[in-house]
Image: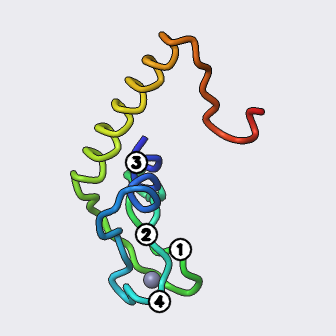
Amino acid sequence: MVSKAVDYFQDEVPFHPLTCGNDSQNHDLLRVKVREWDGSPVLYCPTEGCDYIQTWIPEMVLQAYRRDRERIDEYKNEMKDLGIELRTTETDA
Ligand SMILES: [Zn+2]
């Protein structure tokens, strides 16, 4: 869930995305991975050769994801009530 929330925030939410602490201009946006030694989710920079890790994830990332997911669910239910079928991705077709 945390990983989905971060991807959502980075790609969909029109706030400043979470950027690399080594090079916020040129490196890719941060993504989530599970830290091996304790299993906790951390943010990392996917740019090759960069070792930037951020051990905290802003609460607003999860809040934005929860809020919008609820809104999307509401929307889907409304459409369902109207008898309209929604396709979430093009590959569903
Ligand atoms: Zn980086």
Q: Earlier in the sequence, mark 3 or mark 2?
A: 3
Q: Amino acid at mark 3?
A: Ala
Q: What secondary structure is found at the residue carrying circle 3?
A: helix
Residue at (43% x, 58% y) in the render:
37
Q: What secondary structure is found at the residue carrying circle 2?
A: loop
Image quadrant in which the C terminus is located: top right
The residue indicated by pointer 2 is: 30
Image quadrant in which the N terminus is located: top left
Residue closest to the eye, 86 or 37: 86
| Label annotation for residue 46 | 1
In front of the other: label 2 or label 4? 4
- On screen, residue 63 versus residue 90, left or right, reads left
Q: What secondary structure is found at the residue carrying circle 4?
A: loop
Q: Amino acid at mark 1?
A: Pro
The residue indicated by pointer 3 is: 5
Per the model, the C-alpha gap separating discs 2 and 4 is 12 Å
Seen in the picture, residue 52 relative to 16 is either above or below; the reply is below
Q: x, y (%) of residue 88?
A: 61, 35
Per the model, the C-alpha gap separating discs 1 and 2 is 7 Å
Residue contact at pointers 4 and 3, CB within 8 angstroms: no
In front of the other: label 3 or label 1? 3
Per the model, the C-alpha gap separating discs 3 and 1 is 17 Å
